[in-house]
Image (cartoon, rainbow, N blue to C red):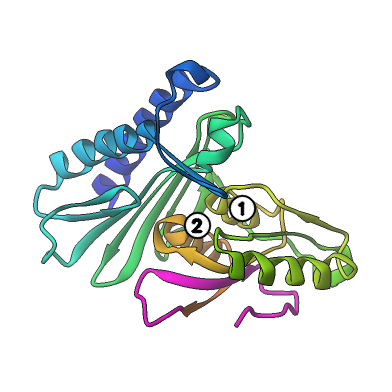
């Protein structure tokens, strides 16, 4: 898998450099779509196009499934999962907490994951059975097992129902843990758990491209992830991810 990982790292770094170049230049940001709780930028599309060219240029028989659409051979057992900007709202508002997330699955099982944070130049990588790494340093999740000592992150998604559920979850957990953080990037939240910076992440509605790479990182760092498919969908989930040592409520 070394060649696959090398190409994924190259694609993530090139997309990250492209995004960093345009960061905080709000006059150049073209909004393709906006709702009350979400924004999609032209740069999302351009970033995914760059990533697609790198990945499928190297592996033309592979499939690609991203937030901005699909490409390649959709019958292939090899499928790249891409989020070209995870944390688009943060990016649009000039908050330096966003990333590029790339994963590769074979017959539905994730084999590698790459998350790149252009703001900090932090690169998370992982391969199934080979561990998770941050800029080459092997990772392990935190040892915290007492909920009141934990720092966790939660997500609220975008629909009214999901936000209401998320607020209830926030209220339930806030009094039980040391702190709850709402950070705006699921992929970075998962990477932080793999690194030991955070102890858990819970969200009731999340997409495959948001979590594919991060889930592998956590598992390879010794953590635990529980996913439940939503609405008979293969790419929408509820998620509870943690260091595997905490007892947490699992969203229904």
Q: Is residue 75 visible?
A: yes
| 157 versus 18 height, above or below | below
Note whether 213 is above or below 10 in the view shown: below
Residue 178: percent from the left, percent from the top?
88, 60
Crowdedness near tag 2: few (<14), some (14–19) or many (≥20) residues, C-alpha within 10 Å: many
Placement of the C terminus among the 4 image quadrants:
bottom right
Residue placed most toward the observer, 23 or 75 = 23
What is the x, y in percent for residue 100? Answer: 44, 41
- Whether residue 234 sits left or right of residue 36 in the image: it is left
Question: In this image, 104 relative to 251: left or right?
Answer: left
Would residue 223 be seen by someone viewing this image from the given angle?
no
Q: Are marks 2 and 1 in contact (CB under 8 Å)?
A: yes
Nearer-the-camera pick, 122 or 249: 249
Position of 198 compared to 211: left or right? Answer: right
Q: From what the image shows, is residue 147 above or below residue 133?
A: below
Residue that carries the numbered disc 2 in the rendered image:
214
Mark 1: give few (<14), some (14-19) or many (20+) Cα within 10 Å: many
Q: Position of residue 238 (x, y in %)?
A: 54, 73
Rendered image: mark on residue 189: 1
Secondary structure character of the magenta stretch overall: loop
Which of the two discs, 2 and 1, labels the residue nearer the N terminus? 1
* 59 is higher (above) or lower (below) than 199: above
Question: What residue is rendered at 29% in x and 63% in y?
Answer: 105
Q: Quadrant of the N terminus?
A: bottom left
Q: Is residue 248 magenta?
A: yes
Residue located at (42% from left, 80% from top): 231
Residue 232 sits inside the magenta stretch: yes
Q: Position of residue 52 (x, y in %)?
A: 23, 41
Tell me which segment is drawn in magenta: 230-252
- Horizontal placement of 92 versus 32: left or right? right
Mark pair 2, 1: CA separation: 8 Å
């Amino acid at each position: 898998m070394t060649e696959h990982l090398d190409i994924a790292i190259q694609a993530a770094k090139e997309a990250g450099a492209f995004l960093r170049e345009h960061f905080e230049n709000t006059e150049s940001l073209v909004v393709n779509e906006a709702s009350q709780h979400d924004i999609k930028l032209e740069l999302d599309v351009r970033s995914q196009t760059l990533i697609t060219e790198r990945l499928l240029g190297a592996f033309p028989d592979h499939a690609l499934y991203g937030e901005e659409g699909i490409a390649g051979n959709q019958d292939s057992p090899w499928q790249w999962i891409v989020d070209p900007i995870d944390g688009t709202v943060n990016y649009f508002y000039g908050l330096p907490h966003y990333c590029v997330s790339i994963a590769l699955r074979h017959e539905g099982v994730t084999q590698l994951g790459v998350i790149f944070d252009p703001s900090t130049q932090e690169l998370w990588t992982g391969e199934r059975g080979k561990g998770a790494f941050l800029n080459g340093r092997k990772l392990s999740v935190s040892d915290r097992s007492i909920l009141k000592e934990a720092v966790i992150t939660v997500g609220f998604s975008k629909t009214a129902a999901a936000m209401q559920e998320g607020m209830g979850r926030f209220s339930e957990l806030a009094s039980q843990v040391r702190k709850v953080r709402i950070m705006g990037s699921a992929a970075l939240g998962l990477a932080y758990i793999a690194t030991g910076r955070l102890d858990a992440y819970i969200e009731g509605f999340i997409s495959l491209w948001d979590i594919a790479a991060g889930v592998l990182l956590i598992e390879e760092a010794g953590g635990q992830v529980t996913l439940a498919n939503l609405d008979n969908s293969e790419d929408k989930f509820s998620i509870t991810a943690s260091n595997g040592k905490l007892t947490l409520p699992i969203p229904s």
